[in-house]
Amino acid sequence: MIKPEKVSYGGWDNCLKLGSDNFELIVTLDVGPRVIRFGIPGGQNLFKEFEDQMGVTSGNEWMSFGGHRLWHAPEVYPRTYAPDFNPVEYVWQKDILKLVQKTEPETGIHKEIEIRFEGDSVLLTHRLINRNVWAVEIAPWCLSVMAPGGRAIIPQEEFKPHPEVLSPARPLVLWHFTRMNDPRFTWGDRLIQLREDNQIDSKQKIGMLNTQGWAAYELGRDLFIKSIRYIPGETYTDLGCNCEFFTMPGFLEMETLGPLKKIDPDSASEHLERWWLVPDVELPEDEEPLIEVLNSHLENIGFNAIKV
């Protein structure tokens, strides 16, 4: 990874650009911590940018801005929606960029994101530190707000016929506003797909316990893959979710969650994601040929092939 370069971006004067031969990302220092851009050098931004919020540095209410952010779960208003307009400090040491947010006065929670390029991937360590004088029970919650016009691809659990296995495979969690017959969903045998469609004016969300370790987002001919951690025996929020997907016209969120833990004063909870970006990929619509193309990329980065 090349040493971060100070740049202006999207109306913010203070940003850092990190690059390699495979991809580049831009983080904001005027607000955040947030990764506002991730893409191939000179190519499209895989992350959503809310045009009316770009460059904004103050306000009374939380703004998404787009990009990739760190929250704490479970989702409760107003705790979860603490505004993040304060400048972000950073430390560059041993090829690791650490972004440090001032402690949220509303919650007493201190957020950090560490970014490290490792070969053809980016490793992000998300950290919640409790600065209260009492313990708090929360979980790290990492949200990538993806640009419109793409589709999320989520692996199902491995198929095993009845009565070979009688126990359930994983929870699938629905919200009060979830409609399983929404045309943006494709419920396949081996994959679940969810498309962003700005012509459908409603919100959709699903969650699950994803033990396969990955989820993907296709945008044009770019394929974004992120790793999803699952730690057996741990408790996860939202009826057992470590992976959630939300969409409404204009964007789609790929969300991962760490375990729900009681964090003592001045202690921390960490959650890791790893990102890959595969350019110039053409993914079929039908499931079997789609799996064939996906498997070639999944095996290259260390995941098990999807069994057809």
Image (cartoon, rainbow, N blue to C red):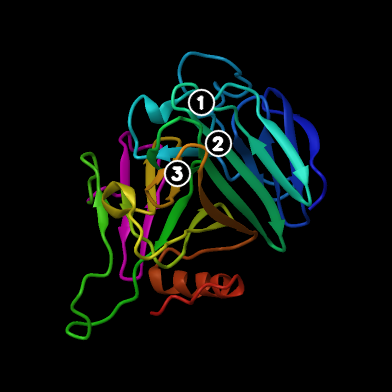
Task: Name the residue rendered at 18%, 82% in the picture.
Answer: 162
Q: Is residue 137 above or below residue 160?
A: above
Question: Pointer 2: residues within 10 angstroms few (<14), some, or many (20+)?
Answer: many
**Residues drawn in magenta:** 181-205
Relative image position of residue 142 (x, y in whole percent):
48, 44
Q: Earlier in the sequence, mark 3 or mark 1?
A: 1
Q: Of helix, strand and loop, which mostly describes the magenta segment? A: loop
Residue beneath disc 2? 111
Cβ–Cβ below 8 Å for labels 3 and 2? no
- What amino acid type is highlighted by mark number 2? Lys
Residue beneath disc 3? 141
Q: Is residue 281 above or below residue 82?
A: below
- Rounded to the nearest angstrom, the CA distance separating label 3 from label 1 is 16 Å
Relative image position of residue 5 (x, y in whole percent):
81, 38
- What amino acid type is highlighted by mark number 1? Glu
Check the image and name the residue furthest to the bottom. Answer: 164
Q: Earlier in the sequence, mark 3 or mark 2?
A: 2
Task: Name the residue rendered at 35%, 70% in the picture.
Answer: 190
Relative image position of residue 91 (x, y in whole percent):
74, 39
In which quarter of the view is residue 308 placed?
bottom left
Tell me how many marks there are: 3
Is 202 a magenta residue?
A: yes
Question: The residue tagged with tag 3: helix, strand or loop?
Answer: strand
Whether residue 201 sits left or right of residue 216 in the image: it is: left
Cβ–Cβ below 8 Å for labels 2 and 1? yes
Residue beneath disc 1? 104
Question: Pointer 3: residues within 10 angstroms few (<14), some, or many (20+)?
Answer: many
Is 124 a magenta residue?
A: no
